[in-house]
Image (cartoon, helix red, strand yellow):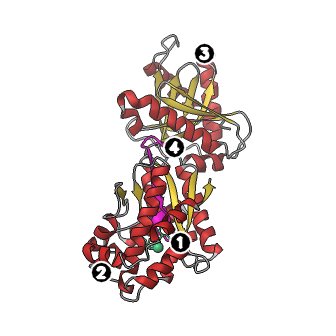
Amino acid sequence: MYKAFLIKYGEIGLKGNNRHLFEDALVSSVARALKKTDGDFVVTKENGRIYATAREEFDYDEVVGILQKVFGIVWICPVIQIEDNGVEDLSNKLVEYIDAAYKEKNFTFKVDARRARKNFPLNSMEINGEMGHVLLEAFPGLKVDVHNPDVLISIEIRKQINIYSKEIPGPGGMPSGVSGSAMLLLSGGIDSPVAGYMISKRGVRIHATYFHAPPYTSERAKQKVVDLAKTVSEYAGPISLNVIDFTAIQLEIYKSCPHDELTIIMRRIMMRIAEAIAKKNGCMGLVTGESIGQVASQTMHGLYCTNAVCEMPVYRPLIGFDKQEIIDVAQRIGTYETSIQPFEDCCTIFVAKHPVTKPKLDIIERDEKKLPDNIEDMINEAIETAEVIVCE
Ligand code: ATP
Ligand code: MG
């Protein structure tokens, strides 16, 4: 029955002169997301509103599901749009709408009319009264409740007339790309996909880097990361995933450095490589799935040592989350099932039995000097030979 959706946004309305940039970004995100559907949608903005109007038949549940993943959307309202053919026509269309939209006609309601065009013969109050009356006559099971109605029926008299009464929550946040871009260190674990989701919710476009260690890590492990990037991209938009062949570097660290420092030294080199690729892509920061105290390398001391190699800000959206809180988000956004597939990632193979929990930066820096002289060449080669996979 619906051919269009009225899309309401919140926060982005507040941005003063930048408002149109935010709106345009949201229009693009909505249009891009809806390309995946059959509806052949036209997305337009009009007086602080965004409309997505279908020119073809579409699957309602699929479209709503897709819109619920577009950051920046606060409410999704399936809307009936009619031409202004006078009060009687509006009454008829309203009755038809309620008849089709609600199986059980035994709810309380309130009509909330807004007249943005003053040449309509009734003012807002009069529309409320008249349409309330029409509905009570048509459906004897309905009751008016102006304070706490089950159904709020909005009628907006604009160029056309909008009728809607359902508001489906969107994900909130800000539209993709309005806040610049960042490089996500994406592993196959539970945390980093959630971190990517969280930062992109704030309008940050994400790129990703994954460190792969074949043959110690399998193709399946890499595929898992690609799958995770695809799931995150349903919210974040296309993600270009840089796959770094990390085996040679990792073996060198394993050979040359004290084993209790492996994770910290490995993480520092990962950060350097990710930062170099981030710079090439115009990113303004790095993003990880770290959370204080979760594992040995994520103590305050560990994070201090890792952070010390980075010039860019490192964003850690999960820093204060408990594991269960992270799992809850992962389940909600659909990454959890993929994350728990049992394929080794490169860290789990090279970890020490007893990693340092309180590494000291000067000691780590001293021990890194034990790496062979050509380690810088190896790092550059890893950067230059990155495989880029566009995940969408
Ligand atoms: P995750 O679930 O995100 O893997 P984790 O709890 O397993 O997190 P660690 O393995 O200590 O934590 O990794 C900390 C962070 O370092 C990860 O959240 C991720 O951002 C980054 N990271 C770890 N391993 C890799 C990898 N192989 N490729 C890319 N980034 C990685
Ligand atoms: Mg991990």
Element on which disc 4 rests: loop
Ligand 1 closer than 8 Å to the CB at disc 3? Answer: no
Q: Residue at 51% across / 58% down in the picture?
A: 208
Query: Can you give x and y, in whole percent of width and height, for residue 270 in the image?
Result: 44, 67
- Which residue was labeled with disc 4? 107
Q: Residue at 66% across / 46% down in the picture?
A: 60
User: Does residue 287 lie above or below 51 as drawn?
Assistant: below
User: Does residue 154 lie above or below 88 as drawn?
Assistant: below
User: Does residue 336 lie above or below 18 as drawn?
Assistant: below
Residue 21 falls within the magenta-colored stretch: no
User: Does residue 224 lie above or below 349 as drawn?
Assistant: above
- Which residue was labeled with disc 2? 357
**Crowd band around label 2 with a 10 angstrom C-alpha radius: few (<14), some (14–19), many (20+):** some
Ligand 1 closer than 8 Å to the CB at disc 1? Answer: yes
Disc 2 marks which amino acid? Answer: Thr
Q: Nearer the viewer, mark 2 or mark 1?
A: 1
Q: Nearer the viewer, mark 1 or mark 3?
A: 1
- Of 169 and 113, nearer the camera is 169
Q: CA distance from mark 4 to mark 1?
A: 62 Å
- Which residue was labeled with disc 1? 246
Residue farthest bottom in this picture: 353
**Crowd band around label 4 with a 10 angstrom C-alpha radius: few (<14), some (14–19), many (20+):** some
